Image (spheres, rainbow, N blue to C red):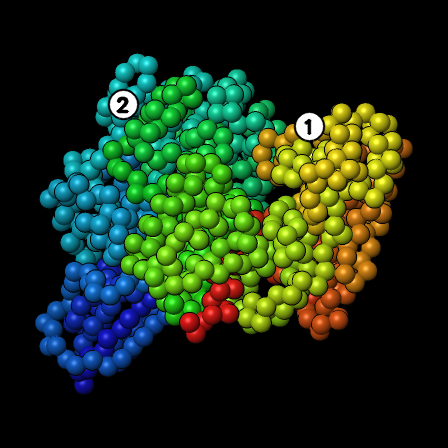
């Protein structure tokens, strides 16, 4: 019996070859009808034998393209249209789009095979792609995802490309960015020697420049990257000098997996991340350190080539290990506009490899590490953004603008939490402009009106994002406390807004309910019922406020608030710089000092006590230095870190650390003991709260929990416990996850608005 059914498929189903996949399956089961992109996903009308339709539905839901992700499926009976064949229809756009925008994908093996096949018409063509790979988010200008709405709209397909595009059995059937050397964009290189056009000549010249120690700005998927030979120490330090990079590590791109193994230890999970379609930068233990690449750091951040261009550079004998860092000056966002790149990178780059295809929006490389609790995304960008981060119970749109550091924004549309790429630190003008652009970009793309939107923001009164939120003419503005948002981000990712947990939020800075600078918080409750503060690190003082975050010695002075005379004596015996004694006096006289519970500053204080007495050149530097120092020593002792039911008291163990330091004990051994002491303090306080409130799950979030050694100690301590540990997986534990937590708390509390 012939029937008709209408099928709606939600999820990541546009830009991943889903329509041609459906087309081929319909042909296989001899069905008629149509498939098209709609506002919410893929719409299918299918007619034929009932059993065949059932098999068809099972086929498309069980064996869909690897880059697709189905989140929901609706099937209902429909009137017969007496369709003669099955076809792909033009996309529809009548209501607000809610389809999930696909992320950019690394070049696939089939395209790579064609790229290096002399008999293929796309031989050595740097823009080769198909429905299984290539640019998505970085070329989409509006929804639905069709070629006229991408940055490829200015290139008309040649007859050969057009034939592939409309051939249902071809891999490029409805591949929106498809092109070839005859009809697509190209690359050229420009520098002191003028301009060289022609893809092969330009890429060969770039490889030659890199071999000779030059620094080249290379246009990629989401912006320009500055590249140089990572094994050329002079070139690396010159790049650091020109970029004003300080000591922050550079990322590396290596030729292949075999080369990666020569530089980092790679476990199975790390190999899976390196070779995934997202192709993130993977932080792993270094097997071989490169001078200038990662000073005072035993990890390296490594990624594999992810565009055809990268593979071509290595093919034409570029150095096998390249520094590949965002093209910008220190702390500014990645540059993605050609004219801006030439102007802004003058004096930094020796040459520019420029591609003609415009980039719709800047997107950095993602950063991931395998923690003791599994893979964790530290910077969510290319390959992950803007894939939905969670499903939230909100019929009304929610715009969460995040925090000022490591900013992301989250837009909730019809329950989907769409999380932007990493946008950077909003104190920088260019990062703030990128933030504004991304807010308006997502609102426009999803046709969301501010007048019907709830805007969530951080409680910090001086945040740029907070001021921006207040200036939006929205339905409602709701402030969300920073550390509650940290905990809620993990609950949102786990789809567990009703789950009662012990939430541990440890980071550097966040505005507290009492106006103090929080950062060592223990919560009890759920996102739905509220997260109540039930404990915290004992209050210390921050002399100079934000300046203490840049100078660990100042942070250390603030943790000796109860015994300034003893602090001065310790400082004299350890020959601390004068700045420490000035900070102690500020604390003693309560001049420009601010109360804090920040565990991030506690880590800075410990680093200062053990020898990190200069200023930091990038966020988290002192804590990273302390972790890597601790990794070099065995665990010999544990310091006292008592929990009294309300406070974790740092005073005993800082004093014990100082005494060990004065006795000449190895700083690495003290650093190792410090980490274990913090872990045991967390363990005891969480166990105590869990017993008191009958809760068996603990959430760990905040920048402090990027520390792998601390997590390893916690995993060991909790191993035989009956408590479950949750951390973020694809949501960063640092402030990059704040916007999702804000959105989750608003959605959980205001789902009926």
Q: Kindly identify the residue that appears in the image at 58 percent across and 34 percent down.
A: 618
The quadrant of the picture occupied by the N terminus is bottom left
Q: Label 2: which residue?
A: 201
Task: Describe the element under mark 2 as helix, strand or loop.
Answer: helix
Provide residue 532's location: percent of width, then percent of height: 65, 65
Q: Earlier in the sequence, mark 2 or mark 1?
A: 2
| Residues at marks 2 and 1, CA–CA distance in whole angstroms | 47 Å
Mark 1, residues whose alpha carbon is within 10 Å: few (<14), some, or many (≥20)? some
Camera-side residue of 501 and 18: 501
Task: Describe the element under mark 1 as helix, strand or loop.
Answer: loop
**517 relative to 609 in the view: left or right:** left
Camera-side residue of 24 and 502: 502
**507 relative to 679 in the view: left or right:** left
Camera-side residue of 321 and 431: 431
Provide residue 49's location: percent of width, then percent of height: 20, 80
Mark 2, residues whose alpha carbon is within 10 Å: few (<14), some, or many (≥20)? few
The quadrant of the picture occupied by the C terminus is bottom left
In the rendered view, would you say 481 is above or below 753? above
Residue 236 visible in this rendered orientation of the protein: no
Provide residue 230's location: percent of width, then percent of height: 50, 26
Residue 746 visible in this rendered orientation of the protein: yes
Q: Label 1: which residue?
A: 614
- Quadrant in which residue 14 is drawn: bottom left
**694 relative to 736 in the view: left or right:** right
In the rendered view, would you say 149 is above or below 752? above
Find the residue positioned furthest to the right.
663
In front of the other: label 2 or label 1? Answer: 1
Which label belongs to residue 16? none
Provide residue 341's location: percent of width, then percent of height: 35, 28
**488 relative to 653 in the view: left or right:** left
């Amino acid at each position: 019996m012939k029937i008709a059914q209408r099928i709606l498929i939600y999820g990541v189903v546009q830009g991943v070859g889903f329509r041609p996949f459906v087309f081929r399956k319909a042909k296989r089961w001899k069905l008629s009808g149509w498939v098209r992109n709609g506002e919410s996903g893929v719409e299918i009308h299918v007619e034929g034998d009932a059993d065949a339709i059932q098999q068809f539905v099972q086929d498309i839901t069980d064996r869909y393209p690897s880059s697709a992700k189905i989140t929901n499926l609706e099937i209902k009976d429909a009137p017969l249209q007496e369709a003669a064949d099955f076809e792909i229809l033009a996309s529809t756009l009548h209501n607000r789009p809610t389809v999930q925008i696909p992320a950019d994908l690394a070049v696939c093996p089939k395209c790579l095979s064609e790229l290096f096949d002399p008999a293929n018409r796309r031989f050595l063509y740097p823009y080769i792609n198909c429905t299984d790979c290539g640019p998505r988010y970085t070329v989409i200008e509006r929804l639905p995802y069709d070629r006229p709405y991408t940055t490829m709209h200015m290139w008309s397909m040649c007859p050969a490309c057009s034939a592939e595009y409309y051939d249902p059995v071809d891999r490029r059937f409805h591949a929106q960015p498809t092109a070839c050397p005859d009809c697509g964009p190209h690359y050229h290189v420009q520098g002191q020697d003028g301009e060289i056009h022609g893809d092969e000549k330009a890429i060969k010249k770039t490889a030659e420049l890199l071999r000779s120690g030059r620094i080249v700005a290379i246009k990629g998927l989401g912006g320009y990257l500055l590249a140089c030979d990572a094994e050329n120490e002079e070139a690396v330090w010159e790049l650091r000098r020109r970029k004003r990079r300080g000591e922050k590590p550079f990322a590396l791109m290596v030729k292949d997996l075999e080369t990666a193994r020569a530089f980092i230890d790679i476990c199975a999970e790390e190999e899976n991340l390196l070779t995934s379609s997202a192709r993130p930068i993977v932080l792993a233990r270094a097997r071989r350190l490169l001078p200038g690449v990662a000073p005072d750091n035993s990890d390296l951040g490594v990624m594999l080539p992810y565009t055809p261009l990268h593979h071509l550079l290595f093919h034409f004998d570029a150095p096998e290990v390249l520094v590949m860092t965002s093209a910008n000056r220190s702390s500014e966002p990645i540059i993605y506009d050609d004219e801006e790149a030439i102007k802004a990178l003058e004096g930094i780059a020796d040459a520019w490899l420029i591609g003609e295809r415009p980039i719709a929006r800047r997107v950095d490389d993602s950063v991931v590490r395998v923690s003791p609790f599994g893979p964790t995304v530290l910077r969510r960008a290319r390959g992950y953004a803007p894939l939905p981060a969670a499903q939230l119970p909100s019929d009304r749109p929610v715009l969460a603008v995040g925090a000022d550091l490591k900013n992301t924004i989250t837009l909730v549309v019809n329950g989907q939490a769409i999380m932007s790429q990493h946008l950077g630190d909003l104190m920088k003008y260019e990062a703030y402009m990128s933030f504004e652009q991304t807010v308006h970009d997502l609102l426009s793309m999803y046709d969301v009106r501010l007048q019907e939107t709830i805007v969530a923001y951080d409680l910090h009164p001086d945040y740029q994002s907070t001021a921006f939120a207040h200036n939006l003419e929205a339905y409602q503005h709701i402030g969300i406390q920073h550390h509650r948002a940290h905990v809620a981000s993990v609950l949102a990712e786990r789809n567990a807004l009703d789950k009662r947990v012990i939430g541990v939020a440890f980071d550097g800075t966040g505005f507290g309910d009492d106006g103090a600078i929080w950062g060592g918080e223990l919560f009890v409750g759920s996102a739905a019922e509220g997260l109540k503060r039930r404990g915290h690190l004992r209050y210390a003082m921050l002399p100079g406020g934000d300046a203490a975050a840049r100078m660990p010695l100042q942070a250390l002075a603030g943790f000796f608030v109860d015994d300034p005379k003893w602090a001065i004596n310790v400082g004299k015996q350890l020959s601390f710089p004068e700045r420490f004694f000035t900070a102690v006096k500020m604390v003693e006289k309560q001049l420009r000092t601010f109360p804090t519970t920040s565990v991030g500053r506690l880590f800075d204080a410990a680093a200062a006590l053990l020898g990190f007495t200069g200023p930091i050149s990038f966020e988290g530097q002192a804590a990273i230095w302390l972790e890597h120092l601790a990794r070099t020593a065995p665990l010999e002792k544990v310091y006292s870190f008592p929990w009294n039911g309300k406070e974790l008291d740092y005073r005993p163990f800082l004093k014990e650390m100082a005494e060990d330091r004065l006795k000449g004990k190895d700083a690495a051994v003290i650093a190792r003991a410090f980490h274990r002491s913090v872990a045991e303090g967390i363990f005891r306080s969480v166990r105590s709260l869990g017993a008191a409130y009958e809760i068996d799950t603990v959430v760990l979030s905040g920048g402090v929990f990027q520390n792998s050694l601390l997590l390893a100690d916690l995993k060991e301590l909790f191993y035989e416990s009956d408590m479950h540990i949750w951390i973020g997986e694809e949501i960063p534990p640092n402030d990059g996850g704040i916007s999702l937590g804000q959105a989750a708390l608003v959605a959980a509390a205001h789902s009926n608005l």
